[in-house]
Amino acid sequence: MRRKLLPWAACALLLYLLALRNLHRPPTPAGRPAARFWKAPCPLRSLWSQDLLERQRRRRSVSRDRAPGCGPDRQVESRVADFQQLPQAVKDFLLYRRCRHFPRLLEPRGVCGRGLRLLIAIKSTASSFVRRQAIRQSWGGLGRASGVGLVFLLGVEEEADGHPGLAAQLACESRRYGDLLQWAFRDTFLNLTLKEVLFLPWLGRRCPGARFIFKGDDDVFVNTERLLDYLDGPEPGASPGPALHRSPDLFLGDAIFGAKPCRNPRLKYYVPGAFYNGPYPPYAGGAGVLYAGRLARRLERAARALPLFPIDDVFTGMCLRRLGLAPTAHAGFRSFGINESQRWEPCAYRRLLMVHGRSPQEVVLLWRMLHQGNLTCG
Ligand SMILES: *[C@@H]1O[C@H](CO)[C@@H](O)[C@H](O)[C@H]1NC(C)=O
Ligand SMILES: *[C@@H]1O[C@H](CO)[C@@H](O)[C@H](O)[C@H]1NC(C)=O
Ligand SMILES: *[C@@H]1O[C@H](CO)[C@@H](O)[C@H](O)[C@H]1NC(C)=O
């Protein structure tokens, strides 16, 4: 008789303990998923921190991200204060922030392979034909003979945005140049992080031998030869010592330290406090950065562990911080351009690596001016 009672007693005790735990649980605020954060000593205020915790708790969430036709997260409407007042782009980001796997629509051909010293990956948009053409005809066009590869990273621009026939034009461009890498997500500013999150695994699988990566915008001028010289040897006049460009941690750019989120809803960099609070980690302006191919693998793993953040260069900064790294500032990276009085002075560009904010016409002309045999700089 006693033996039969024992399991029942154990069961009852367990039920009692469970009930007790529920009684002592603080009431959950509306919309917060219950029982998820009861271990946190203080409530996490920002959605990003909650997402981070959730992502770490469930390592398998990757398979959930992969769900085809990833839908909106409607819970966010009640989890973020004043959600309905947010700008539409921010709402879109928050609703779809968990969707990070998208099929490839166009793939480059013959870009990668043996002896690739530098892979240039340019964030472009489908309709920016002219900018891509200018880059191919100038600083991006050195070609495989110089060990340089070029790919353009694209999402999908909606035809409704006034570009009928865009897909057909792109397919033709892709057949002709074989340098387009396109995924099936809406190409918007707050979706730029997807280009990083999707490019890194592509790079690891298709271009594992690339020694260095330059990743930037399609309105930059790059002094490609100078960049290659930099990668080949120590800077002229640099003191002897471990050369940075040989480091597997190389991440170079216009580094920004101690930045804070922009809280002005009218600006495109706006990030609501309910989504993220606290300062940004050190990061390098996304107009153009240079990093070691070996770092790309580690960045990929770090990116997988972090929730998406809508500003792509800050997101990369977060990945670096997760790896215990920070970008290195290099004066040759000019995210904010150069002195206006020198805009057309080719000699001003000779020692620079990257200058942001140049039109396609300027890019082509500057490149020509820099390569005229008679160029003499003081
Ligand atoms: C990002 O792309 C996805 C997939 O196309 C889309 O649902 C979402 O609205 C986009 N987000 C933004 C901020 O545009
Ligand atoms: C730009 O160059 C001009 C003349 O070369 C100089 O007077 C001016 O101070 C410079 N401006 C800045 C912001 O460096
Ligand atoms: C260099 O040569 C080109 C023509 O080849 C000419 O148009 C240009 O003015 C010359 N520049 C200088 C600084 O002499």
Image (spheres, rainbow, N blue to C red):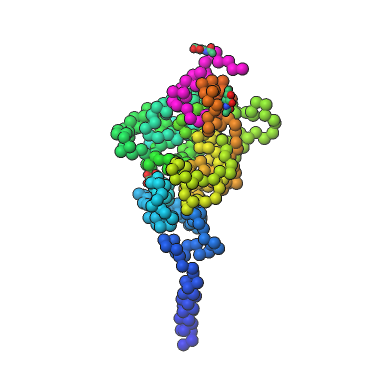
The x, y position of residue 165, in whole percent, is 30, 33
Residue 366 lies in the magenta-colored region: yes
Give the residue displayed 67% in from the left and 29% down from the top.
238
* Front residue of 93 and 173: 93
Magenta range: 355-378
Give the residue displayed 39% in from the left and 55% down from the top.
77
* Front residue of 168 and 134: 134
The x, y position of residue 284, in whole percent, is 55, 38
- Seen from this angle, which residue lies furthest bottom? 1
Residue 151 lies in the magenta-colored region: no
Give the residue displayed 47% in from the left and 49% down from the top.
272
The x, y position of residue 286, in whole percent, is 50, 37
Q: Is residue 141 visible?
A: no
Left or right of residue 282, residue 271 in this image: left
The x, y position of residue 197, in whole percent, is 46, 43
Give the residue displayed 58% in from the left and 30% down from the top.
332
* Front residue of 146 and 58: 58
On screen, residue 263 above or below 81: above
Q: Is residue 242 visible?
A: yes
The image quarter containing residue 245 is: top right
